[in-house]
Image (cartoon, rainbow, N blue to C red):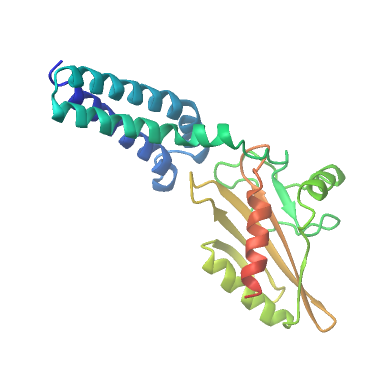
């Protein structure tokens, strides 16, 4: 038991490495985003609890023997375990708002922009690009009433170029761009787990300026947890800066 603290600390470090690989695996191409997310959701809390318990036991054992090095190692392991449990504690104290059960958000629910280049063969896709119609539109209106087309005083060509610039600044991968028709399709990814969402942007001429419509569709998941709506609003805000 003399090395109990070192053992606890070693287990904690290994646990951190496992978590890091799980989270970064999709970005590094080691796993699909949904796999990394599933592993994280299933095993983070049990792993954190095990590390924390092991750390506390190490502290108790070495405290009885007055072994400072062992106490310190056990304490560090305990902190690592509690850090792993932090998301669980935070969500327990402040439960997150449940996302609307849709994964397709658009600024035009009557005539949503269509994907012409990105299709059903996109990697890892489980959701269709076909719009769900009135039912999806009703859910969106209730959950995200602030989603609407962006109107600007810029000319259509200027608005199109500005939209492409913003997409690039936000790190989107432009898949296809048609300057003549002022539309482009892109893939945007979440910072954590690297989930892919496909986006189409269309600029149309309006009296005194132009209008910009967008649509974002997640490749997996019944709900996108509000990611596409937040991305559209962030895009529009940055566009106007």
Q: Nearer the viewer, residue 129 or 170?
A: 170
Query: Could you tell me residue 37's position as x and y percent?
Result: 50, 36
User: Can residue 117 be seen here?
Assistant: no
Count the numbered circles shown. 0
Name the residue at 49% across, 47% down: 194
Q: Quadrant location of the C terminus? A: bottom right
Image-quadrant location for residue 126:
top right
Q: Is residue 186 left or right of residue 44?
A: right
Name the residue at 68% across, 53% down: 229
Q: Nearer the viewer, residue 117 or 93?
A: 93
Above or below: residue 66 compared with residue 155:
above
Q: Is residue 53 left or right of residue 137?
A: left
Query: Could you tell me residue 28's position as x and y percent?
Result: 39, 47
Image-quadrant location for residue 3:
top left
Query: Could you tell me residue 158's position as x and y percent?
Result: 67, 82
Query: Could you tell me residue 67's position as x and y percent?
Result: 13, 24
Above or below: residue 236 compared with residue 10:
below
Name the residue at 60% across, 71% down: 164
Above or below: residue 8 compared with residue 17:
above
Name the residue at 65% across, 52% down: 228
Q: In this view, does 191 lie to the left or right of 107?
A: left
Above or below: residue 57 compared with residue 183:
above
User: Can residue 204 be seen here?
Assistant: yes
Q: Quadrant location of the N terminus? A: top left
């Amino acid at each position: 038991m003399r090395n109990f603290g070192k053992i606890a600390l070693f287990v904690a470090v290994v646990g951190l490495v496992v978590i890091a690989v799980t989270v970064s695996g999709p970005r590094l191409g080691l796993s699909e985003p949904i796999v990394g997310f599933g592993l994280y959701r299933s095993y983070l809390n049990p792993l954190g609890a095990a590390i924390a318990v092991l750390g506390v036991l190490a502290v108790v054992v070495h405290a009885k023997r007055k072994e400072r090095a062992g106490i310190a190692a056990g304490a560090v392991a305990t902190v690592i375990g509690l850090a792993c449990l932090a998301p669980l504690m935070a969500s327990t104290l402040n439960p997150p708002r449940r996302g609307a059960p849709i994964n397709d958000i658009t600024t035009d629910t009557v005539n949503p922009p269509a994907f012409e280049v990105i299709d059903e063969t996109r990697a890892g896709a489980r959701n269709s690009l076909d719009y769900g119609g009135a039912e999806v539109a009703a859910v969106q209106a209730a959950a995200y009433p602030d989603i609407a087309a962006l109107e600007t005083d810029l000319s259509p060509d200027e608005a199109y170029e500005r939209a492409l610039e913003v997409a690039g600044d936000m790190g989107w991968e432009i898949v296809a761009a048609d300057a003549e028709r002022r539309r482009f399709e892109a893939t945007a990814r979440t910072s954590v787990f690297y989930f892919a969402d496909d986006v189409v942007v269309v600029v149309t001429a309006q009296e005194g300026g132009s209008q910009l419509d967008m649509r974002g569709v997640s490749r997996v998941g019944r709900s996108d947890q509000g990611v596409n709506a937040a991305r559209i609003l962030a895009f529009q805000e940055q566009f106007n800066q």
